[in-house]
């Protein structure tokens, strides 16, 4: 859950709330984004204003009213960066595959053991 009492102060900038995302919060966000994509609220790789408004509303109900569009945009950037790092690590390796249902890379035990030996 969000850490409401934690403030970050940067030089020459006003303080702002630091939102710490949990796995459950990410799950709500990703499901809300999937819903908006299925409604057609994503065009040419960009989310529509309506999509952001709907996602803010969904997260505000599930998490709390303090969620903003900027929180969502920042978290999406972070999740993209994390996915890109994992993808770069695994995509060229034989035996690894992304499972979109469980949202994890999967491989047989032998493949993992070989990977661990090399790393």
Image: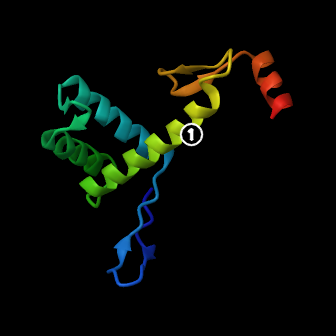
Camera-side residue: 31 or 11?
Answer: 11
Q: Is residue 63 left or right of residue 65?
A: right
Q: Reply above or below: 59 against 10.
A: above
- Residue that extends furthest to the bottom in the rendered view of this protein: 12
Residue 24 seen in this snapshot: no
Q: Quadrant of the C terminus?
A: top right
Residue 90 seen in this snapshot: yes
Q: Residue at x 44, y 41 (%)?
A: 80
- Residue that extends furthest to the left in the rendered view of this protein: 50
Camera-side residue: 63 or 45?
Answer: 45
Q: Residue at x 19, y 41 (%)?
A: 54
Q: Reply above or below: 66 against 92.
A: below
Q: Residue at x 22, y 30 (%)?
A: 44
Residue 61 is situated, as x and y percent measured from the top left of the image, at: 26, 48
Residue 81 is situated, as x and y percent measured from the top left of the image, at: 48, 44
- Residue that extends furthest to the front in the rendered view of this protein: 92
Res 39 → quadrant: top left
Res 94 → quadrant: top right
Tag 1 residue: 85
Q: Residue at x 41, y 83 (%)?
A: 11
Residue 84 is situated, as x and y percent measured from the top left of the image, at: 51, 37
Q: How is the image coloured?
A: rainbow
Q: Reply above or below: 25 against 14.
A: above
Q: Reply above or below: 23 against 65.
A: above
Camera-side residue: 39 or 42?
Answer: 42
Q: Quadrant of the N terminus?
A: bottom left
Res 87 → quadrant: top right
The number of discs equals: 1
Q: Is residue 85 left or right of residue 59?
A: right
Callout 1 environment at 10 Å: few (<14), some (14 to 19), or many (20+)? few
Residue 112 is situated, as x and y percent measured from the top left of the image, at: 76, 24
Q: Secondary structure at mark 1?
A: helix
């Amino acid at each position: 859950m969000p850490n409401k009492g934690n403030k970050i102060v940067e030089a020459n900038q006003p303080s702002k709330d630091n939102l710490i995302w949990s796995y459950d919060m990410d799950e709500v966000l990703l499901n809300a984004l999937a819903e908006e994509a299925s409604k057609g609220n994503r065009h040419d790789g960009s989310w529509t204003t309506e999509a952001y408004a709907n996602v803010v509303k969904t997260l505000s109900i599930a998490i709390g009213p303090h969620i903003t569009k900027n929180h969502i945009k920042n978290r999406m950037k972070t999740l993209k960066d994390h996915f890109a790092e994992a993808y770069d690590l695994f995509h060229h390796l034989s035996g690894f595959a992304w499972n979109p249902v469980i949202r994890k890379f999967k491989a047989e035990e032998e493949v993992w053991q070989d990977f661990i030996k090399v790393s």
